[in-house]
Image (cartoon, rainbow, N blue to C red):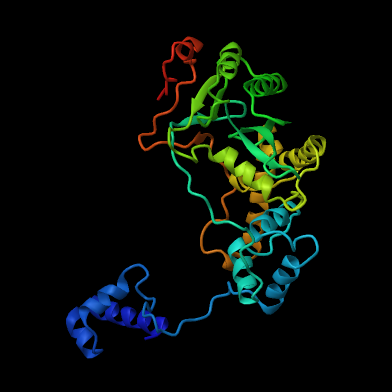
Amino acid sequence: MPREIRKEVIALISEACANGARKFKACELLNLSIRTLERWEKPGGLDDKRHNAKRKKTGNKLSIDQVALVLSIANSEKYRDQSPNKIVPQLADEGRYVASESTFYRILGAAKQLAHRLRSKPAKHYKPKACEANGPNQVWSWDITYLPTQVQGLYYYLYMIIDIYSRKIVGWSIHDSQCGLHASDLIKQACIDEKVMRSQLTLHSDNGAVMKGITMLSMLEKLGVMPSFSRPSVSDDNPYSESAFKTLKYHPMYPRDTRFESITKARLWCIEFVRWYNNDHMHSGIKFVTPAQRHSGADEEIRENRHQVYLAAKEQNPERWSKNTRDWTLPNSVTLNPDRKGVKLNSERIVSITDIVCGDRLRQVA
């Protein structure tokens, strides 16, 4: 029964009851049960909720021209190598709203232009002891990865430190060996560059020999940096560094086939990569702003501008939104592998080098 007729039936029965008629008698005359009438009188009860009911078409469906615009943008020279997750924020930065990411994906899928671009499946992330950061230079994550050379079995080693709050690469170096002295020099220089004070920083890493060596730990104690380590026997307890290494090795310009000819060329390549990663890379973990923007706080204005673009688009075409516009806000804090109990690492306690010299295990401070 159409919505207009239902509304008219309710009005007629209400008028009859107001003149002294019994409600069930009025319903009998219209061949209608009281329960059906009561359901119609509830909020939203006038709508036909049957799956096969014929409903009036809404105005949120894209037109042929709008679909063509989405395809033309996705296939343009500027955006053809990017996913919708990166296309939509860039359009918002230009003051344009064309469609949401899901709409981009749906249209590309219907046009058979959608394919998985990565070579690997998403990796599982485990949860060691929690470290929380509510600003830059509070929790860093670091690790070492291999860079292949043109000699089989010979590698260069990339040492890289990531700020988990902003995802910025705050320090890196490349050497031909793994050594605690290289690591301690790197963390010292990174603390100087970022002007880190004593007891300000927690440094997270896995349980490698370089990370737990006396040279590295003595430098951390000298700097007043709190060390944090992954759980034993867990291969992937350092997700921020692992994610950054994956971005590095799946970068289009990474010399996967030719490999690195020399350590000098490896360092030159990483200089350009770090510049791109910090200043140009729109990071999915921080609402598609760059790590440098997040680190400096400039991302707040950018995200607010995007929010205003969406509000203007909704005001212009309100029928395309059934709920609120996209949320461009970011949480006030970032937690490195939060545990189930929500226990956070106490950054005021520093692991003593005496414990290592005496042979005691590093204390995992919960």
Residue drawn at x 64%, y 57% is: 85
Between residue 168 and residue 212, name the one nearer to us. 212
> Percent from the top left, x then y, of residue 112?
64, 75
As drawn, 120 above or below 214: below
Residue 352 image position (x, y, % from top left): 48, 12
Is 93 placed left or right of 314 in the picture? right
Residue 113: give x, y in percent of width and height: 66, 72
Can residue 280 be seen from the camera position used here? yes
Q: Quadrant of residue 40?
A: bottom left
Residue at image location 33% in from the left, 79% down from the top: 11
Instruction: State the residue at coordinates (72%, 54%).
Output: 90
Is 222 on the left or on the right of 276, as rendered?
A: left
Measured along the vertical axis of the image, is residue 233 above or below residue 323? above
Foreground of the two, 26 or 202: 202
The reply to whether residue 297 is visible in this rendering is no
Above or below 66: residue 136: above
Return the x and y of residue 239 as percentages of the image width and height. Answer: 54, 40
Residues 45 and 68: in front is 68
For the point 58% across and 34% down, the residue is: 164
> In this view of the protein, which residue sits in the foreground, 333 or 223?
223
